[in-house]
Image (spheres, helix red, strand yellow):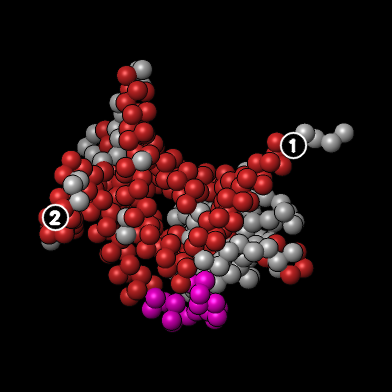
Amino acid sequence: MDPIAWFDGAQQWLFEAAVQPLMFAAGLAGLLEQGFRATGWLLVGLLQILIMLTVIRALEHWRPAEQVTDRAAVRTDIVYTLVHRLGLFRLVLFFTLDPLWDALVTELRLAGLPTWSLDGVWPGVTDAAPVSFVIYLVLFDFADYLLHRAQHRFSWWWQLHALHHSQRQMTMWSDNRNHLLDDVLRDSAFVLLAMLVGIAPAQFIAVVAVTQLLESLAHANVRLSFGNVGERLLVSPRFHRVHHAIGVGHESAGPGSLGGHNFAVLFPVWDALFRTARWHEEPGPTGIRDQLPEYGQRDYGGGFWAQQWLGLGRLFGSLRRAGRPART
């Protein structure tokens, strides 16, 4: 069976059987279109979690990179994963920021910004679904690389992104361990890019779904390399674990410094082009230098809400320091 047709049928069934009755009961009949889109994200999330629990979990059991001792930290990461992969975070964006971005793009169109679709750049080739999917996947991955560099480049943004790197026990659940404000910034950039390049909603969901699933693999607690050639084609757990290594993947110039290596999300070609790759580095302990006792043992929070609150504190502290006049 055509996988796209199967997904469309499954989305329609799930919407009619469960989501639509709930929306009618809640008095949300005027938002059925948004509900149907949210059902697509929910179905994708359920499929992702199924693959994570079967395939990626089997890899972690086969060759773990380290012994997991902090189970509570992993359980918190599972909460992040469920919030994001089951569409709860996306649902909030549907009713808050997405209408603002729709209005912004509409105003830009009225002001003269041309309507453009990447699918029509090379008629007969780019409008073929598999070809356009690959092109969009590469385009969004490049944007992801640039955003990831920015998260490590600007001090105020790093204060939010640091939460992601504070996990000392990386597993397949660690990908979504992010500050919610950090996710709002990143997701807003992708939604705007999607609107500007004219990607179809179904293709956008597919691009995000594939990216998220491969990110879960990259964060997995597994000793796995793709070899000399494969490591340069797709981000492996070994390659990405170097990015999370203390003092290597970030803070590489010393305590408190910004920067790092191995920023690519899917395709390491970006790290090769911009000379940020560390191909042969052995992954060390993960985390942030200031978590170590000799550097102050900073607390990034143990639970979901503590981590969110401390992230805001770090952000406001960074903005206050940036606003102080320089001493003479």
Check the image and report above or below for 305 versus 187.
below
Q: Position of residue 81 (x, y in %)?
A: 40, 63
Q: Amino acid at mark 1?
A: Arg
Residue drawn at the location 35% of the way across and 23% of the way down: 107
Q: Amino acid at mark 2?
A: Pro
User: Magenta segment: does it hold 51?
Assistant: no
Q: Position of residue 222 (x, y in %)?
A: 48, 74
Residue drawn at the location 74% of the way across and 37% of the way down: 324
Label 1 and label 2: CA atoms lie apart by 55 Å
Residue 115 in sight from this viewpoint: yes
Which range of residues does the magenta coloring cover? 57-74
Q: Is residue 3 left or right of residue 166?
A: left
Check the image and report above or below for 321 versus 227.
above
How many numbered marks, from 0 up? 2
According to the picture, the residue beneath numbered tag 2 turns out to be: 21
Name the foreground residue: 265 vs 130: 265
According to the picture, the residue beneath numbered tag 1 turns out to be: 324
Residue drawn at the location 32% of the way across and 59% of the way down: 86
* Residue 253 falls in image quadrant: bottom right
